[in-house]
Amino acid sequence: MSRIHTLTASEILDSRGRPTIRAICTLTSGASAAASVPSGASTGEAEARELRDGDARRYRGLGCRRAVANINEEISRAIAGRECASQADLDNFLIDLDGTHNKARLGANAILAVSISFARAVAAEKEMPLYLHFASLLGRVPETLPRLTINLFSGGKHAGKQVAIQDVLAVPVSPSTVDGSLVMMYDVYQAAAGLIYQRYGMRLLTADEGGLAPPADSAEALVALAVESIEAAGYRPGEDVAIALDVASSHFYSDGVYTLDRERMSSVEMIAMLESWAGKFPIVSIEDGLAENDWSHWPALRQTLDRRVLVLGDDFLCTNPSRIERAIGARACDALLLKVNQVGTLTEALHALRLARSAGWMVTVSVRSGETEDNWAADLAVGWCGDQFKNGSITQSERLSKYNRLLAIEDETGWPITAWPGRAAGS
Ligand code: PGA
Ligand code: ZN
């Protein structure tokens, strides 16, 4: 049982220079902790709503002063001195106080800042590392660390749409440590930068999450370049380093048509194209291969890629329990991309994770494209036993704060990273 003494918040800037929120929660025991919230750009329609000021004269309407004031005034007044029996007790209180279905009144950004700063303050009160406190919310002690899926190339909304698909990620599959995965990734990133320089005469141009953003002729050419980069770094594609894609296809879908590389494709043609890529390239996971509202075709995508490639839902699921239940019923995918701020509280995200696990799905814990230097997402990925962690590229401090935190957790625990299904780690 913890009692909140004070809650305060302020507006800070994220990695795109846009406003976001940091909250500080102090308990009556004296334990105190801060937490900052991230923000997406390639957002799903079903996401909980961030509250933005809408004042065009300030940050083009993106200011967070109203959301900050909601923490400093209404939420603080309602919560100060209140006993919180658990994280769920606090989160449910916040949900009720907001009173809307998507947190639009107080703001999902305000609510999440309170939810996470409370979790961290309670961990501090228990003198427990945050990942172990998150594990206690899940009710399971982790024995492994998540495998890394790391942005190599970016396109779509994160890179000015020079290529329509959003992320080509490298997945180091042979290392059994975070350290070994990052060593391998550094080589692949440098090899890719060299190939881009040779081919396009370009120095490194990076996208929102630090991925390289070459002007490839097509999405397929970008995936092929990833395979070449792995080889050029001296690794075996598929055996040492595999590939994951975030197609983020909602952003080039309209009225039943996917427009990719000047071609117009039906859902069935889109599935056939992804299947052909899975045959040509060492792809282990495809995120949002179909659009978020293309419900009737997702089951066919899953069936087509069955067992060979994870069918991962991001905008399709929005970490939203009712969408996840519907997708389980329809056998529409087999992995959840978990982003806490898509739903707005730790408790609802935990419910989403439990539902995914109940269906035997894998879980990739993910950060957002607009991140802060806060590193709670690394603790969450470990504490909630994520199979994968998606944190952008290996450049930019908002990404490195999480990788560096994982390295520290690795040092502290000595846990190996999860083997990719069907492969022993370290092979
Ligand atoms: P976002 O995108 O954080 O910009 O929404 C990340 C993703 O699509 O995985
Ligand atoms: Zn995505």
Image: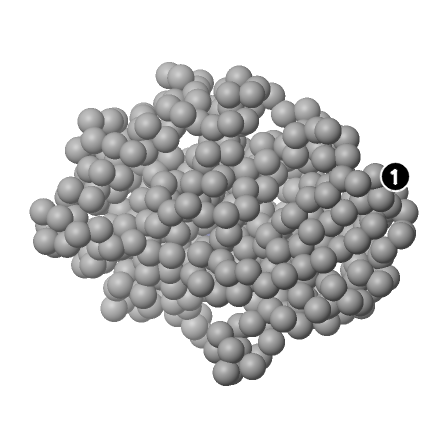
Q: Quadrant of residue 369?
A: bottom left
Q: Position of residue 97 (x, y in %)?
A: 82, 64
Q: Describe residue 210's horizontal placement relative to residue 86 as left or right.
A: left
Q: Is residue 82 left or right of residue 373?
A: right
Residue sitting at x 73%, y 29%: 127
Asked whether the viewer can see residue 255, the reply is: yes
* Vertical position of residue 364 compared to residue 327: above or below: above
Residue located farthest toward the front when viewing the structure as drawn: 30
Q: At 32% from the left edge and 49% from the top edge, which residue is drawn?
A: 211
Q: Residue at x 50, y 48 (%)?
A: 373
Disc 1 target residue: 1
Residue 310 visible here: no
Residue 121 on image: x %, y %: 73, 41
| Quarter containing the N terminus | top right
Q: Neighbour class for label 1 at 10 Å: few (<14), some, many (≥20)? A: few
Residue 93 sits in quarter = bottom right
> What element does badge 1 sit on?
loop
What kind of colouring is applied to the model shown? one colour
Q: Considering the image in quadrants, where does the C terminus appear?
A: top left
